Image (cartoon, helix red, strand yellow):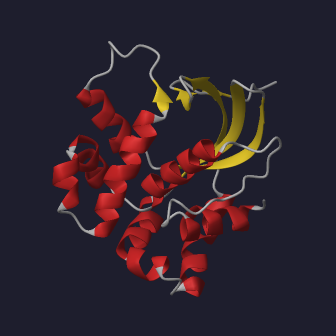
């Protein structure tokens, strides 16, 4: 999947999280993992820091009264949290969850995956969605969702594939019948010579 296809999948299909985006990987990633990365990208592209903090701490009842985009944001944040296996749940608190979503505006492009029955490793390229692009996506969510503004969408997101990013390796484990991403990713570092 080239960068332009990634951007298109990232935003056009992610406004409807149930839509499957087939990652360029073999063996086939389980659907739960595909949805997880769709949700992460939706959070990064279609919400502000303030909205993420509010959504991360809102009850389902509070979320129900919000506009569609913010209801969906609350839902996908809960699903991302549910799919993440905390290394030490005793350390984490509601404040830690808020801090995570306050800072999280990083889109994940699946590069490859490898796995067996109980464990998968997924290599992703992580790119920060710049505030200007993010605000444009938030402002134009309804038109993007309906497929309008394709040329403007391309113009606003074209530069994302040229941005510097970093590579992470995520470990997934099948736990009690559900796929869980380990909380701490492996970040690949470039060592200078």
* Quarter occupied by residue 97: top left
Residue 175 picture location, percent across and down:
56, 22
> Looking at the rendering, in which quadrant would you find the C terminus?
top right
Q: Can residue 174 be seen in this view?
A: yes
Residue beneath the point at 34% across and 65% down: 69
> Closer to the camera, 19 or 132?
19
Identified at 49% across, 66% down, the residue is 16
- Residue 95: x and y, percent? 24, 29
Q: Is residue 40 above or below residue 9?
A: above
Whether residue 189 is visible: no
The residue shown at (71%, 30%) is: 121
Say above or below: 124 vs 132: above
In this picture, residue 83 sits left or right of residue 63: right
For residue 135, what is the image quadrant?
Answer: bottom left
The one of 53 and 129 positioned closer to us in this rendering: 53
Q: In which quarter of the image is the N terminus?
A: bottom right
Residue 107 point in image, percent of width and height: 55, 51
Question: What residue is at 33 percent from the left and 43 percent from the top?
Answer: 102
Question: Residue 130 location, x and y as percent?
Answer: 48, 58
Q: Is residue 98 above or below residue 174?
A: below
Q: Is residue 118 left or right of residue 49?
A: right
């Amino acid at each position: 999947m080239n960068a332009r296809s990634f951007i298109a999948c990232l935003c056009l299909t992610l406004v409807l999280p149930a839509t499957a985006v087939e990652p360029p990987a073999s063996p086939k990633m389980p659907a739960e993992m595909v949805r997880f990365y769709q949700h992460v990208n939706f959070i990064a592209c279609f919400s502000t820091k303030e909205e993420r903090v509010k959504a991360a701490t809102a009850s389902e009842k509070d979320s129900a009264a919000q506009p569609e985009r913010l209801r969906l944001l609350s839902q996908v944040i809960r699903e991302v949290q549910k799919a993440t296996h905390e290394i030490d749940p005793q350390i984490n608190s509601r404040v830690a969850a808020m801090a995570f979503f306050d800072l999280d505006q990083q889109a994940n492009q699946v590069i490859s995956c490898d796995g067996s029955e109980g464990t998968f490793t997924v290599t992703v390229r992580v790119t920060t969605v710049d505030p200007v692009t993010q605000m444009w996506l938030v402002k134009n969510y309804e038109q993007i969702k309906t497929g309008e503004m394709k040329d403007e969408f391309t113009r606003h997101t074209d530069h994302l594939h040229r941005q510097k990013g970093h590579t992470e390796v995520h470990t997934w484990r099948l736990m009690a019948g559900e796929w869980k991403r380990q909380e701490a990713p492996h970040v690949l570092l470039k060592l200078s010579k």
